[in-house]
Image (tube, rainbow, N blue to C red):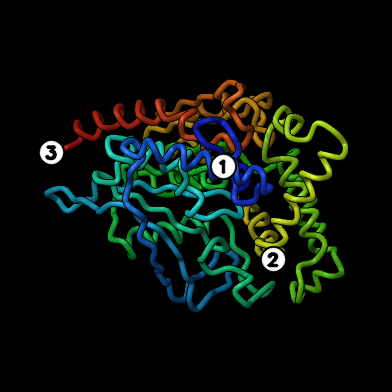
């Protein structure tokens, strides 16, 4: 779900918010990985902004200028009818941005030559969702006066980015991790003819509820009820941001890894304190609050039968946010006309919810999906 706890192919933690010793290890590992450049070379992403004027949110509020920041790799291609044939849309998780995919454990396994999303063949689009990254967000200046956005607003803004901003009228694949995975389910329902295939990761096709809703509510309430929040008009980050960061540490990995990294009382305090301090330095309470509240309108359950494109949902068995014992994915995927689901078994390589960004765990399944839908696309060609 969150951008924290991303991991590399060697199944060690590589996160921008990790403690200094782990960060040093990650740097050394990335340098080691660079020796295999022939397998991981891909062009640097191009960054730009697209402005939507007078964007109307589902809440009824309007923003005169909604800025959507995005990254792209590769060039769009069109067929004889002018239809885009090679666009890949990849959407990030809560509090993250498109930058989270430009990492060895994701881009290094997917974007290089002859890899699944070879950037010399595909047009890869990595948007920063509303309220995230370098897109318009509360911390830009409006604070708690920023329009209340939801997942449907985020999907529609990305749709307009592709169609109006980039001239993309069709996607080879729409996929996302965590929040981006939830957006993927919505894309399949709201724009069923737009894509050849869908691949949501680390998500469930049902309304946020149970423990998933509860931990979000605890963070939301902690911020809103914090006197230092001051209705969103604080000068320094309110203490409740520390509560939010602690909850993220608790939920974003699996218990085995957390125990391994923090095997004693003192070590746990040390690891947690360093994690929290990094979040407080880099994040903003209003942005976190809005990002968590944005899931209020997520409810793909009633319309799963509307998804027409082949869909492959991938979760991991040690995901604490979407635990497989709920049985929701296995039950609901039956309602998707061309849907199937896979739960990656727990292993030394999985990283709980963060497994979604470790492409080595599911790259083979992605390749199968691309091959299967390539055949169906060819059959549809005139």
Q: Which residue is mark 1?
A: 26
Earlier-in-chain disc, 2 versus 3 = 2
The x and y percentages for residue 363 are 42, 30
Q: Which residue is mark 3?
A: 382
In the picture shown, does residue 280 fall above or below 138? above
Residue 329 occupies quadrant: top right
Crowding at dot 1, Cα within 10 Å, few <14 / some 14-19 / many 20+, comes out as many
Residue 344 occupies quadrant: top right
Mark 3, secondary structure of its residue: loop
Q: Residue at x 16, y 37 (%)?
A: 381
Q: Is residue 206 left or right of residue 83?
A: right
In the image, 308 versus 68, the foreground residue is: 68
- Front of the two marks 1 and 2: 1
Mark 2, secondary structure of its residue: helix
Q: Which residue is mark 2?
A: 286
Instruction: Evaluate if marks 1 and 2 touch, with contact meaning CB atoms under 8 Å apart.
Output: no
How many numbered dots are placed on residues in this image?
3
Q: Is residue 322 left or right of residue 76?
A: right
Q: Is residue 129 left or right of residue 174?
A: right
Q: Residue at x 48, y 44 (%)?
A: 176
Instruction: Evaluate if marks 1 and 3 touch, with contact meaning CB atoms under 8 Å apart.
Output: no
């Amino acid at each position: 779900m969150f951008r924290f706890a991303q991991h590399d192919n060697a199944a060690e933690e590589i996160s921008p918010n990790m403690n200094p010793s782990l960060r040093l290890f990650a740097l050394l590992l990335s340098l080691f990985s660079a020796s295999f450049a022939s397998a991981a070379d891909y062009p640097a992403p191009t960054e730009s902004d697209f402005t939507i004027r007078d964007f109307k949110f589902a809440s009824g509020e309007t923003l005169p200028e909604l800025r959507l920041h995005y990254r792209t790799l590769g060039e769009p291609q069109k067929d004889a009818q002018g239809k885009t044939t090679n666009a890949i849309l990849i959407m990030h998780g809560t509090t993250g941005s498109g930058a989270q995919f430009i990492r060895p454990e994701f881009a290094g396994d997917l974007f290089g030559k002859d890899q699944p999303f070879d950037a010399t063949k595909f047009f890869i689009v990595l948007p920063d969702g509303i309220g995230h990254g370098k897109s318009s967000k509360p911390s830009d200046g409006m604070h708690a006066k920023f329009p209340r956005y939801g997942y449907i607003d985020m999907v529609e803004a990305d749709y307009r980015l592709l169609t109006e901003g980039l001239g993309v009228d069709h996607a080879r694949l729409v996929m996302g991790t965590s929040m981006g995975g939830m957006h993927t389910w919505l894309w399949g329902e709201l724009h069923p003819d737009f894509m050849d295939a869908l691949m949501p990761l680390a998500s469930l096709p049902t309304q946020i509820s149970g423990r998933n809703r509860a931990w979000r509510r605890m963070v939301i309430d902690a911020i809103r009820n914090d006197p230092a929040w001051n209705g969103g008009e604080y000068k320094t980050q309110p203490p409740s941001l520390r509560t939010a960061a602690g909850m993220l540490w608790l939920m974003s990995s699996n218990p085995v890894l957390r125990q391994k990294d923090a095997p004693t009382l003192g070590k746990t305090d040390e690891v947690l304190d360093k994690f929290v301090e990094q979040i407080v330095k880099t994040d903003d309470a209003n942005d976190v609050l809005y990002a968590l509240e944005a899931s209020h309108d997520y409810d793909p359950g009633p319309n799963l039968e509307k998804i027409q494109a082949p869909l492959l949902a991938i979760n991991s068995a040690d995901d604490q946010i979407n635990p497989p014992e709920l049985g929701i994915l296995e039950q609901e995927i039956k309602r998707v006309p061309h849907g199937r689901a896979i739960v990656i078994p727990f292993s030394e390589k999985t990283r709980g919810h963060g497994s979604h960004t470790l492409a080595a765990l599911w790259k083979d399944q992605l390749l199968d999906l691309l091959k299967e839908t390539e055949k169906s696309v060819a059959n549809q060609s005139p």
